[in-house]
Amino acid sequence: MPQTDYDLIIIGAGPAGSTTARFAATAGLKVLMVDKRQELGAPIQCSGAISGHGLASAGIDADPEFIHEAIYGFAIYDEHGNRKVHDYRQLKADEYGPQAGKKPLGYVVDRRRFDRYLMTQAERAGVDVWLKTEGLGYRPQEDGTCTVSLRRYNEAIHLRTRVIVGADGLQSQVGKWAGLQTHIKITELAGCLQFIVDGVETEGLLEIVTGHEWAPGGYAWVFPKGHGYAEIGLGVIATMTDKPARWHLDKFIKRSFFRDRFANCRILEVQGGGVPLAAPLRTQYADNMILVGDAARHVNPITGGGLHTAISGGKIAADFLVGHLGDGLPVQGGALEAYQLAWLAELGDKMWKLYGIKTDIFHNMNIGERDRLLYATMSDYFSPTSEFKKI
Amino acid sequence: MSKLQPVLFNIGWNACINCGACVAICPQEAGFVSPFDTIAVDRPCDIACLLCEQICPVETITHVPVERLNGSAVAVDR
Ligand SMILES: Cc1cc2nc3c(=O)[nH]c(=O)nc-3n(C[C@H](O)[C@H](O)[C@H](O)COP(=O)(O)OP(=O)(O)OC[C@H]3O[C@@H](n4cnc5c(N)ncnc54)[C@H](O)[C@@H]3O)c2cc1C
Ligand code: SF4
């Protein structure tokens, strides 16, 4: 193999990038990870809910540094406010609870602190991390390596690496650099808005409100945020409404069955983002390049959750690259398809199945039936007997 | 994709929450972004599908049609 500056250059230091970086460096690869931001995770574009086994899947301790609040279950509402509760403090009382010897089911994390924590763990494993460094492009070379163009505090930098990992999130450009089909349909990207609020009580549950009336094409949520704060948000599909998410959130707060509960809420933070309720990318690799996390659309198409899949996917990517580069195998001419196959086997096939379920619901043009289907599916998804517990 | 006249986007920065949804939905080739992680506002978009305006959670993207003159874009209708 020709000389390179790094074995891997990772574009984007979100959960997917940092996890890939940490496992790769731990196994001995020379890794550079760059992020264009000055503070990781900010501005926040995420509600931060992740399960305990999601964290465990990538060897991440539930560190108080990034945890807002522990979660013990779910409450799913239909459009009228009837609810189905799965409280694991009651369902599996010997395992889950706040008492010593028991554990939470999951957590709501602070993405600023979570992303910084994961970056720190990567750095401690030997990864070089450069903030304020934007990835601008890459070019495969005839000797089997590639060059990556970066800009760091206005300085142009060109480095040689064996593989570039696109972990640059939903707005991913890395896939586009390689000419991959990354375009997402307007019917499958939910426009989301959320407020962190004071003055709204929560009960250690993630609350999910279904119903076209409140969030056409998506759902609304109320999450505990620690310190007595809560988060109220929703996502909508633009083709199912002629109003923006902000209008729907205002309506949800003022006119839904929660209006009394929200009557004294005071807004502390405003956040938003796009959530793909879509299938994973069909092609997640190219010469010298693989994609991971949101960039590969590794997002649960039913819940919109992408943290668990980002860190699990990061570990899969790192394990693959360590083996592949360790064996001195080529990284051009379709050789990296093996990564995608490994990912499909471990995680992706399940996500395609979820996508099928989600598509069936939203292809139903009868709003009443669709509402019933979504409520039933969500209620089932979070139940202890769900076959999808692992993502 | 639509064959509309090219447009120049304008972002009401006062309402923008930097959520990146407009970039995520944009079918343009790589690099059609502003330094603030929104869609580009310094050059015309020749696709003009306007999906970014539809997805924006705070409805803060607008556009003006532009014509091409000697390769450079000029705003019309201002
Ligand atoms: C409103 C909202 C709520 C959500 N709530 C949840 C939730 O409760 N639970 C859950 O599991 N998921 C949730 N998600 C999804 C979750 O946020 C994402 O799936 C997750 O952030 C994906 O992680 P990632 O590492 O792939 O990408 P990101 O976290 O997006 O990280 C990408 C990183 O790449 C950097 N970057 C991008 N381009 C470049 C470049 N050219 N050069 C250098 N750096 C670059 C960015 O600065 C960023 O730091 C939510 C999303 C939204 C929008
Ligand atoms: S979608 Fe709207 S709010 Fe979000 S970054 Fe683009 S212009 Fe700003």
Image (spheres, coloured by chain):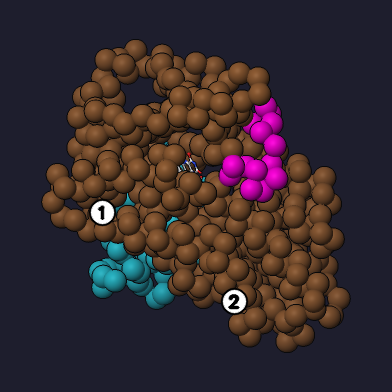
Chain colours: A brown, B cyan
Q: Mark 1 — residue?
A: A361
Q: Residue at x 60, y 68 (%)?
A: A342
Residue under label 2, please give it: A337
Q: Position of residue A204 (x, y in %)?
A: 47, 23
Can residue A208 be seen at all in this image of the molecule?
yes
Q: Is residue A382 left or right of residue A289?
A: left
Q: Residue at x 82, y 49 (%)?
A: A125
The percent position of residue A183, horizontal first and vertical second, equals 41, 66
Q: Is residue A298 above or below residue A192?
A: below
Instruction: Please give the chain letter of the residue carrying mark 2.
Output: A
Crowd band around label 1 with a 10 angstrom C-alpha radius: few (<14), some (14–19), many (20+):
some
Three-letter code for the amino acid on which mark 2 is drawn: Glu
Confirm whether circles 1 and 2 share one chain: yes
Q: Amino acid at mark 1?
A: Ile
Which residue: 81% across, 59% down? A27
Relative to the observer, which residue lies in front, A366 or A389?
A: A389
Of residues A27 and A200, the one nearer the viewer is A27
